[in-house]
Structures are given as structure tokens and as C-alpha cells.
Amino acid sequence: MKAIQIHSAGGPEALQLVELPIPQPEAGQVLIRIEATGVNFIEVYFRKGVYKASFPMVPGSEAAGTVEELGPGVTGFKAGDAVAAVAVIGSYAEYALVPAAQLVKLPEGLSLEHAAAAMLQGMTAHYLAFSTYPLKKGDTALIHAGAGGVGLLLTQIAARIGARVITTVSTKEKAELSRDAGASDVILYTEQDFEAEVKRLTGGKGVNVVYDGVGKTTFDGSLNCLHPRGLMALFGASSGPVPPFELSLLNSKGSLFLTRPTLWHYIATRAELEWRAGDILGWAAKGELKLRTEHTYPLTNAAQAHIDLEERKTTGKILLVP
Ligand code: NDP
């Protein structure tokens, strides 16, 4: 099978096309034939060596496809079932293994491409909005990178709950997409001081929650956008990691809450996985959650997908198709 492999940390050229044997499912595993795999920022971190991995590795953990073969002891699935998962073992490939406990079936009417586009970023948006800081009608949220993969989905979910959503984006084109997703106010943080804008937009009060996946360049300003006892969810670092932090600042800035969440702790049980995947895939199937999949590349072009993601050229979901 064709696969993309990383042999040592490096730039996009580290993503090399190779031929590998189709893996064999062991007990509790399912072999899936991949129709589309999602590109996520975490693969950039692994490729660059920011997150440690043992090489050679086939990157990628999110895919949708059809069941090809069941490992010993697996029940509840059969060959040909349309499925998706965020715990795929090396999804930049034509086939990959998934622990059956992490696999979900697709609802009627949802394409495999849309399922791949929705799973990881959708469930991330879901846990941020319903669990990390459970948004309520009337809350105000600041969401950075509002036209990104997580950003567009989180904005739609927050608006659906009835929260007021303020976003930041880097270009006017992205601002339009963010508004379409439900943002009431969009700040061009490449041109405007987003902290001052948030204060102006909230009449000096600040916001209940900041969802910050940008990290290094936004973190300090984000804390200043919160009103007392507000919550900062630092869920990513697309601009680089946040340096060590003086905890007493949480006190002086208003008894703030700070968390650094990750999806895996929010889908740790089958019940939670089914709740979040069921909501996200169900809303996507009914058209209630809009997915943008215009950044779709052949698997062999994985390097270009990483370049475009890192150069902030993409909006919505990036997919690789084997
Ligand atoms: P995005 O589609 O949001 O892409 C990243 C965006 O970040 C860019 O489009 C850009 O938007 C913005 N950005 C700001 N500064 C930079 C920079 N210096 N370099 C690159 N991009 C920059 O990616 P995802 O939706 O896949 O992920 C968003 C964040 O969420 C990532 O940090 C990712 O790691 C994190 N994440 C965390 C999860 C978790 O459970 N903790 C799960 C999934 C994702 P703009 O041009 O508008 O500034």
C-alpha cells in the first residue's frame, strides 16, 4: 500500500511516499480502507520534532473509510461498514488499523469525506463548548483563528448554543468565512490589537471564555480579554508553544481559570466518544454543521498540505485522499 512516512524530524520534505505491506489486524483491531484522512496541526508538531515520536512513523490519526477486515474478538462491525475514527494508527496511508473501541459507524446520509472532515476538529469543538467551559446562552466567547478547522466548527456550535462569538482571523477573506459561521464580531488580529478590540466590543467587561489554539502570539493578550473568574482554554499552539507561566498572574488578572485540554481525555470512555461523535456526525449529516473541504489533496501531496497549513493558507478542513 502507499503511505507517507517520516524517517527523521524536519520540514515538509520529511514526509516521504513509501510502499508498505498492508497491516494485519490483531485482537481488538479493525483494518480499514481509507477514503479520506484529516490533516491536523499535531502532525506538524510530530514532523518537526516538537512532540516526540519514534521514527520511522506514518503520521495521522483521523480517517474515514470502510471496514476491510476484523481482528480476532471484534464484534459489532462487518466488512464494508462505513466508519470513522480519531485513533487510527498511521492514517496517511491507503489502509490502517484502528482499535475497535475507538471506531464509530457513520449515520445515514454522511459522506466518508465529510466524516473525515468532521471527526477530530468537530469533537474538539464539542468538548471545548460543552465540557471544558460549558457555554450558556448569553455568554461571550473569544475564539482565535476563527476560520481554521476547529475555529469554524467551534463558532457554529457556540452560536447554536446562543453565545455571542468574537473571533480573530488574519485576512478579510477569512473574516467573511468566520462571520458566515456565526461570529458576531471578527477582529483582524494581524492589523488590530485584539485585546483593545475585545474590550471595546464588550464595553470593557471582557469575555467569559477564550478558546485559544494559537498559543505563543495570543496567550498574554487572551488572558487580558477575560472578565474576573473567566476561563482560558489553551488548546493548541499553531504559532508556537507558550513559554513558562507565572501562576500568580491568574490571581492579579481576576481569579482566572487556565486549562490546557486535549481531546483524548474528553473521549476516554465509549459513552463520551459516542456522545461527541454522534452529535457531530449527526449534525453534519443533517447539514446543521457546515463543513468546508475545499483543501483536499492527493495523499502523495501531503507535504504541500503541511506547507499550506503552516503558511496559514487554509481554511476549514484539510483532507488527504489516497
Ligand atoms: P487551523 O485550521 O486552525 O490552522 C491554524 C490556524 O492558526 C491558521 O490558519 C492561522 O489562522 C492560525 N495561526 C496564527 N498564527 C499562526 C502561525 N504563526 N502559524 C500558523 N498558523 C497560525 O488548525 P486546526 O483547526 O487543525 O487546529 C487549531 C489548533 O487546535 C492547533 O493549535 C491544534 O494543535 C489545536 N488542536 C488541539 C486539539 C486538542 O484537543 N487540544 C485537537 C485539535 C486541534 P489565521 O490565519 O486566521 O491566523
Image (cartoon, rainbow, N blue to C red):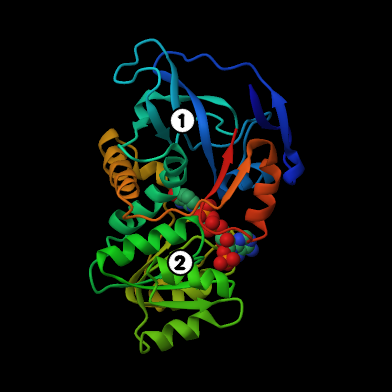
Marked residue nearer the N-terminal end (2 or 1): 1
Residue 125 figure quarter: bottom left
- Picture coordinates of residue 241 (x, y %)? 59, 58
State whether residue 239 appears in this view: no
Residue 185 figure quarter: bottom left
Taking 292 as reference, is 104 above or below it? above
- Picture coordinates of residue 92 (x, y %)? 59, 34
- Residues 21 and 177: in front is 177
State whether residue 25 appears in this view: yes
The amino acid beneath tag 2 is: Leu
> Which residue: 59% across, 58% down?
314
> Which residue: 65% across, 26% down?
2
On screen, residue 32 versus residue 161, left or right, reads right
- Picture coordinates of residue 227 (x, y %)? 35, 78
Rendered-image quarter of ligand 1: bottom right
- Residues 38 and 198: in front is 38
- Picture coordinates of residue 25 (x, y %)? 48, 15
> Which residue: 60% across, 43% down?
43
Report the mark closest to the observer, 2 or 1: 1
Which quadrant: the N terminus?
Answer: top right
Check disc 2 and report its element: helix, strand or loop.
loop
Check disc 1 and report its element: helix, strand or loop.
strand
| Residue highlighted by disc 2 | 247
Q: How crowded is mark 1: few (under 14 residues within 10 Å), some or many (20 or more)?
A: many
| Residue highlighted by disc 1 | 65
For the residues marked 2 and 1, what is the alpha-carbon distance in whole angstroms?
45 Å
The amino acid beneath tag 1 is: Gly
Taking 207 as reference, is 241 above or below it? above
On screen, residue 69 versus residue 16, left or right, reads left
